[in-house]
């Protein structure tokens, strides 16, 4: 209800405003008709409405980057407009051997019927020690005021 009320006042589009008004009215009637709402004192209802207003403001600020069409387009942009074959293979390994079902089994365990080592610990064993950082080159920055070809 609070979400629709806020967006009702934010939009400039008259068609969207009418749709938001209908959704807000329906949500208001649903809230008033719910038996739990009748048991709460007015102070508690006001406290919950204040909390809902705060949540709607937070949701509005953070959701556009991670949800919906804009979030999908942003992810495609960051992925270079698709998945490379290497990344797809890595995601397949993570899906088959790393993600666990509700019962604690992986997809590979359910498919092959055998236990596999834990993905992260196996990867650490295969990798070994990480190499040291590369040494930076000592770059010589020429001084344009010091001319070596001109006799002093």
Image (cartoon, grey):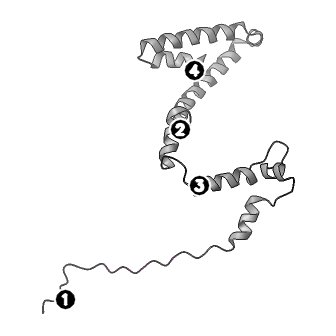
Q: Earlier in the sequence, mark 2 or mark 3?
A: 2
Given residues 20 and 41, the one toward you in this image is 20
Q: Earlier in the sequence, mark 4 or mark 3?
A: 4
**Label 1 to label 3: alpha-carbon separation:** 52 Å
Q: Which residues are magenta?
A: 134-152
Q: Earlier in the sequence, mark 1 or mark 3?
A: 3
**Label 2 to label 1: alpha-carbon separation:** 58 Å
Closer to viewer: mark 4 or mark 2 = 2
Location of mark 1 (residue): 148
Closer to viewer: mark 1 or mark 3 = 3
Location of mark 3 (residue): 87
Kindly identify which numbered label has been placed on residue 3: 4
Q: Earlier in the sequence, mark 4 or mark 1?
A: 4
| Extreme residue toward the left, this view | 151
Q: Is residue 87 left or right of residue 12?
A: right
Closer to viewer: mark 4 or mark 3 = 3
Q: Residue 149 appears in which quarter of the rendering? A: bottom left
Q: Earlier in the sequence, mark 4 or mark 2?
A: 4
Residue 127 image position (x, y, % from top left) = 68, 70
Location of mark 2 (residue): 72
Question: Do tag 2 and tag 3 residues touch (Cβ < 8 Å)?
Answer: no
Closer to viewer: mark 2 or mark 1 = 2
Of the 4 image quadrants, the one containing the C terminus is bottom left
């Amino acid at each position: 209800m609070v979400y629709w009320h806020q967006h009702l006042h934010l939009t400039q589009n008259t068609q969207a405003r009418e749709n938001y008004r209908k959704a807000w009215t329906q949500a208001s009637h649903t809230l008033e008709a719910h038996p739990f709402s009748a048991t709460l004192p007015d102070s508690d209802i006001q406290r919950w409405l204040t909390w809902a207003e705060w949540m709607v403001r937070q949701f509005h600020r953070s959701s556009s980057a991670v949800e919906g069409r804009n979030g999908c387009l942003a992810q495609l942009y960051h992925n270079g407009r698709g998945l490379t074959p290497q990344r797809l293979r890595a995601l397949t390994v993570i899906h088959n051997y790393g993600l666990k079902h509700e019962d604690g089994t992986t997809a590979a365990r359910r498919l092959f019927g055998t236990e596999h080592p834990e993905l992260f610990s196996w990867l650490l064993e295969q990798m070994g020690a990480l190499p040291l950082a590369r040494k930076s080159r000592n770059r010589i920055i020429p001084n344009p005021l010091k001319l070596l070809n001109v006799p002093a």
